Image (tube, rainbow, N blue to C red):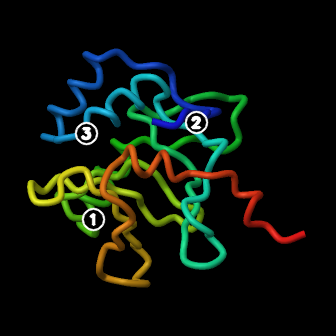
Amino acid sequence: MKKIQLIQGGEPISPEELEKFVNEFELKLPNLYKSFILASNGGYPNLSAFGNPYEDGSEVDSFYAITMVDNDKVDDLVISSRDVIKTHQILEKNLSSHFYPFADDIGGAKFCFSMNDLDFGSVYLIFLDGTTDEPTFICDSFEEFINGLEDIEIYEED
């Protein structure tokens, strides 16, 4: 899997903390994602473009932390997966429990894994602003997603 750098992420978490989180929400997560979150616990990526975001691609704003980042030195706090699940799956019920949200795109849509057996681990983009009711398929796996991330600057016009 391609190495990406995340800045302003959460404090590192232990495998036990991750397992507690997974059990709390009865989640089924891809193993590569678990390794990724244990290594970084969310943050803002140095590579953020998946395809050309100015055409039909998308741009990652941040990967969610498992726990909320509480850092006075950071203006833009990284959101926690726990907060997204509680807000959008439990309270507002506008995000199916068959999806696990792991990142925001630049416009606030949610990058999610499918937790369904038929397409487990596939990545979708879900718009919660009414733009579309159907999830948009992005790729087959978290590894493919990370390997597809590029520097946004290659798509910016001079």
The residue closer to the viewer here, 38 or 148, is: 148
The span from disc 2 to disc 1 (Cα, nearest Å) is 27 Å
Residue drawn at 56 percent across, 29 percent down: 70
Residue drawn at 39 percent across, 65 percent down: 138
Residue drawn at 24 percent across, 31 percent down: 21
Q: Position of residue 74 (x, y in %)?
A: 69, 35
Q: Amino acid at mark 3?
A: Pro
The span from disc 1 to disc 3 (Cα, nearest Å) is 19 Å
Q: Are marks 2 and 1 in contact (CB under 8 Å)?
A: no
The span from disc 3 to disc 2 (Cα, nearest Å) is 18 Å
Location of the N terminus by quadrant is top left
- Secondary structure beneath dot 2 equals loop
For marks 3 and 2 on the same chain, the one whose residue lies earlier in the sequence: 2
Q: Which mark is residue 4?
A: 2
For marks 2 and 1 on the same chain, the one whose residue lies earlier in the sequence: 2
Mark 2 residue crowding within 10 angstroms, few (<14) / some (14–19) / many (20+): some
- Secondary structure beneath dot 1 equals loop
The residue closer to the viewer here, 131 or 116, is: 116
- Number of marks in the image? 3
Relative side of 51 to 117, left or right: right
Question: Which residue is disc 1 drawn over?
Answer: 95
Q: Quadrant of residue 119?
A: bottom left
Q: Position of residue 89 (x, y in %)?
A: 24, 58
* Nearer mark to the viewer, of 2 and 1: 2
Q: Amino acid at mark 1?
A: Leu
Which residue is situated farthest in the left direction here?
A: 117
Q: Which mark is residue 30?
A: 3
* Nearer mark to the viewer, of 1 and 3: 3
Residue drawn at 56 percent across, 55 percent down: 60
